[in-house]
Image (cartoon, rainbow, N blue to C red):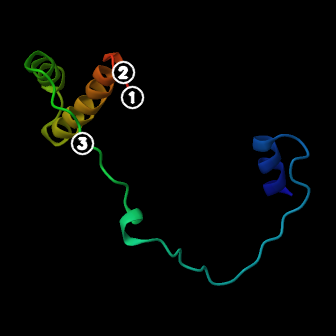
Amino acid sequence: ADILARVNLFLGPGSVQSLRIAQGPVKPLNLPAASTRGARRRIEPLDAAAEAELARSVEAAPDALKAALANLGRAVLSDEAKSRSPRGR
């Protein structure tokens, strides 16, 4: 009853009337090897000014976090540049 209440809270009142739980072995998914890991897209390099600003913005971060934040920043700034370009996405 508690599970039904939570599911209906998420999906809306009366969305789920009953639940059947079956115990047994879980069958592995038959995925092709290429789709087991998401493909990484190529991030366009930033211009020198944007790269310098990004480096300044992450310089106070701990060393263990600095590279990850810089990579995230490059991806975000690259996406912003693409959305502003005339070709767009």
In the displayed structure, 5 sits above or below 77; it is below
Left or right of residue 76: residue 4? right
Q: Label 1 is placed on what type of residue? A: Arg
Residue under label 3: 42
Residue at label 2? 83
Residue 57: x percent and y percent? 18, 20
| Identity of the residue drawn at 15% across and 18% down | 50
Callout 3: 10 Å neighbours few (<14), some, many (20+)? few
Tell which circle, 1 or 2, labels the residue nearer the N-terminal end: 2
Please give the label number shown on residue 27. none
| Mark 3 vs mark 1: in front | 1
Residue type highlighted by circle 2: Ser
Q: Are marks 1 and 2 in contact (CB under 8 Å)?
A: yes
Residue 51 in percent (x, y) is at: 12, 23
Q: Amino acid at mark 3?
A: Arg
Badge 2 crowding class, 10 Å Cα cut-off, few under 14, some 14 to 19, many 20 or more, is: few
Estimate the x, y position of residue 42 in percent, counting from the top left.
24, 42
Residue picked out by circle 1: 89
Say which quarter of the image contains residue 69. top left
**Residue at 83% across / 54% down in the picture?**
4
Q: Residue at x 32, y 27 (%)?
A: 79
The residue lying toward the viewer, choosing from 76 and 43, is 43
| Quadrant holding the C terminus | top left
Q: Is residue 7 left or right of residue 72?
A: right
Kindly report which numbered mark, 1 or 2, lies closer to the viewer in this rendering. Answer: 1
In the image: residue 72, left or right of residue 24: left
Could you tell me which secondary element the residue under label 2 belongs to?
helix
